[in-house]
Image: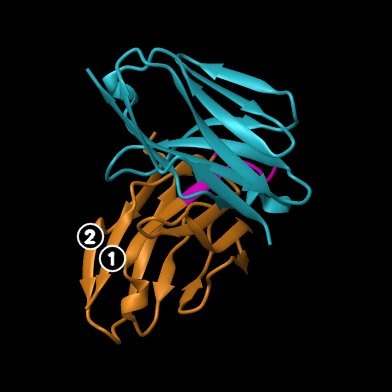
Amino acid sequence: NAGVTQTPKFRILKIGQSMTLQCAQDMNHNYMYWYRQDPGMGLKLIYYSVGAGITDKGEVPNGYNVSRSTTEDFPLRLELAAPSQTSVYFCASSPSGRGDGYTFGSGTRLTVV
Amino acid sequence: EDQVTQSPEALRLQEGESSSLNCSYTVSGLRGLFWYRQDPGKGPEFLFTLYSAGEEKEKERLKATLTKKESFLHITAPKPEDSATYLCAASDGGYNKLIFGAGTRLAVHP
């Protein structure tokens, strides 16, 4: 099993550009999450989804959008990139909402210049 | 405001020198307390979930415990391969959303 796959691994964007971070899981997990990790800070929840067609905001959703058209895929869209969005982005999934540990992807390191 | 605080920020141990990492939380209605291990350049890896005060879980040289205000990750006779950042997280409600601490960077030297 591949688990959770994130692409790309690295990306440099110019201010104002847009991009989509891809996330796919092959474990048939209903719950999926996007977090960002900044140096010296805990991971912060951006968006989450409890199933295909259902998404909701987390703690830091501004500047991002998501969609969940299938159980497997949960892409994160950045519109009008800003330097404050420079971070490492992690996608994660879990089978249910009842205390299961997450399976994380390997992350996307994004730099906005 | 719900919060998770980890201490120390960094810890250096000699191989075989046991120690503990602390995670204090202020979360109303705790649904679960989680520990993850993160190696450089990789995503976090799930270790344990604790649900109620007094609960303990073990995995190899690691043992996690939980009280009403904090959790400890005890590392017994650590080896260099235990070097990593250890993350603590709390779930305060439904949908398994987590509030993470900033982590403890552990370095174990031979």
Q: Earlier in the sequence, mark 1 or mark 2?
A: 2
Q: Residue at x 28, y 65 (%)?
A: A110
- Which percent across, then down, holds residue A34? 48, 59
Q: Secondary structure at mark 2?
A: strand
Identify the amino acid type marked 1: Leu
Q: What is the display colour for chain A?
A: orange
The residue drawn where x is 37% and y is 16% is B17
Question: Can residue A100 be found in the magenta stretch?
Answer: yes
Please name the colour scheme applied to the rendered image: by chain
Quarter of the image for the N terminus of chain B: give it: bottom right
**Residue at numbered disc 1:** A110
Residue A10's tag is 2
Q: Residue at x 41, y 54 (%)?
A: A90
Crowding around mark 2 (Cα neighbors within 10 Å: few <14, some 14 to 19, many 20+) is few
B108, A13: nearer the viewer: B108
- The tint of chain B in the picture is cyan
